[in-house]
Structures are given as structure tokens and as C-alpha cells.
Image (cartoon, rainbow, N blue to C red):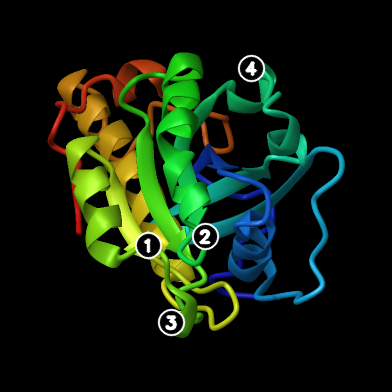
Amino acid sequence: MSGYRAEDDYDYLFKVVLIGDSGVGKSNLLSRFTRNEFSLESKSTIGVEFATRSLNVDSKVIKAQIWDTAGQERYRAITSAYYRGAVGALLVYDVTRHATFESVERWLKELRDHTDPNIVVMLIGNKSDLRHLVAVQMEDGKTFAEKESLYFMETSALEATNVENAFTEVLTQIYRIVSKKAMEAGEDANGSSIPAGEKIDIGKEVSAVKKGGCCSS
């Protein structure tokens, strides 16, 4: 079939991790983006869980491998293996529970302790559909994101609001970093120097992002 690409036919594979307190909706964000599914009876994830989805960015096929915290966050015992090779992260809090927003700083510190300091990170205020129960104002999320040079978005996995946008923005920014570094190295800007389908650890590439230069409202 013309234009068809097999599941394993992709140009880049990027690992993205979901972090944040238990119950903020990480698993539903994952299932909404990768399978367009949502479960009101979602239970805490047990065991390692990740899902993949491919999308097109600048005519390249980007395969996202998105990891969920597998319930470990309840014990504050996320392992270094979970973060290893991650080039993007969605740091999630629940807009109806202020305590989950208070935990964001600790999660960000842990993330930065285990990854390149300039990993592409988006702060996510999830459950925006519960407007009458909001405990964390959007401006508070924006202010924290700007202070820490993070991207920011409010989402609703239930209503599918901004879920696609959030993941796509993170993956696009990662791709732009890779492309920029390829050009700086004198390689083909399209990344042809990297074999298609090879998993890419862009630690060095991510570090090329200037601090304070990665904010978005």
C-alpha cells in the first residue's frame, strides 16, 4: 500500500517518562495518547508499563516509547533504570489536589538527578475537566514552569483535552534538538547519518539547549 510504514519503520525512537504523585492520571494520559482510551476505574499501575506511538514531525517518523511509573511513586522508589535514556518527561499533577502540585519540585529534582539537566520537560496540570474542584490555579502552574524553564499545559485525559498537544510538543522539541546538533556536527540535517530504527540517547544533544530557552505557556 502506498505510503504505508510498518510498525518498526521509524527514523527516531525517543524515550519519554511520566512522573508525578500516584492518582494524578499518568496512566490515563498514556492510554489516551497511545490508544485513545480512558478508564474511570483505572487502578494504580503494577509492574513496568510502557506504550508506544509513532507520529510525523518534519516528514520524519518519530516513535515515542512512553514509560509509566508502575506504581513505584507510592513508595518514592523510582529506580534509576526508569530514567535511563529518557530524553523527555511529562511531570504531572492533579489540579484538584494541591498536595500533588506541592510534590512537583521534589519530582523535578529527582528527574534532574537521574537525567541530563536539560531534558525536555513539560509540566502537566491534569483533570482540567473538574473545573468546580480546581485547587491549583493555571497561573500557579505557569509561574512554576517559567521559573524552572519547563513547558506547561493543562490537560484532561477524560475529555482528551491537550493530551495530543502535550506529547506532540515534547517530541517535536526533542527532535529539533537532535536535528540542530546534527547540523552543528556537519551531518545531514535530516539525520541520515543515524541508521533508521536506531534508538538514540541524546544526552549530549539535550545539553546543547540553553537554560531558560525552553519555556512555553
Q: Secondary structure at mark 3?
A: helix
Which residue position holds label 2?
97
Which residue position holds label 1?
136
**For the residues marked 2 and 4, what is the alpha-carbon distance in whole angstroms?**
27 Å
Around disc 1, counting alpha carbons within 10 Å, would you say few (fewer than 14), some (14 to 19), or many (20 or more)?
A: some
Disc with the residue nearer the chain's start (2 vs 4):
4
Q: Nearer the viewer, residue 7 or 177?
A: 177
Q: Secondary structure at mark 1?
A: loop
Disc with the residue nearer the chain's start (2 vs 1):
2
CB atoms at circles 2 and 1 under 8 Å apart? yes
Which residue position holds label 3?
131
**For the residues marked 1 and 3, what is the alpha-carbon distance in whole angstroms?**
10 Å
Mark 2 vs mark 4, foreground winner is: 2
Around disc 4, counting alpha carbons within 10 Å, would you say few (fewer than 14), some (14 to 19), or many (20 or more)?
A: few
Disc with the residue nearer the chain's start (4 vs 3):
4
**For the residues marked 1 and 4, what is the alpha-carbon distance in whole angstroms?**
30 Å
CB atoms at circles 3 and 2 under 8 Å apart? no
